Amino acid sequence: MLNLCQTAWLDKIDHRYAWLKRTLMEFEEKFGRMFPPSWEVSERICVEFCEITRSVCCSYYFVTVLIFFTMLVILVWQDNKFELIFELLCI
């Protein structure tokens, strides 16, 4: 089941991108001149960040769907069990 930190992380994804923007600006100020522009270091950091974010979001989405499906199956099973007991009592 998703814990509170994971849920909050998904709710605050805009903060994650704001953090990336701030961090890239700081990186460019401190280390930008150390690397040749052809290396595209900031771009590579950004691409890696986006790939990790996409991967994490997809895995959380999958877990959420799996949890929802499991809960739905349990609810249907419980309802079916209740209906059977109710039917036996009413006979």
Image: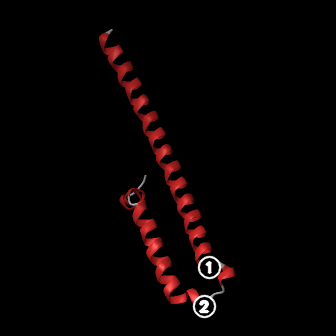
Residue 67 placement, left or right of 54: left
Residue 8 figure quarter: bottom left
Q: Which quadrant of the rendered structure holds the C terminus?
A: top left
> How packed is label 1: few (under 14 Cα within 10 Å), some, or many (20 or more)?
some
Residue drawn 67% across and 80% down? 39
Foreground: 7 or 47?
Answer: 47
Estimate the x, y position of residue 46 in percent, counting from the top left. 56, 70
| Disc nearer the start of the sequence (1/2) | 2
Label 2, secondary structure: give it: helix
Cα distance, mark 1 to mark 2? 10 Å
Residue drawn 36% across and 20% down? 83
What is the three-letter code of the residue carrying label 2? Met
Residue drawn 40% across and 65% down? 15
Estimate the x, y position of residue 68 in percent, counting from the top left. 45, 41
Foreground: 81 or 75?
Answer: 75
What is the three-letter code of the residue carrying label 1? Val
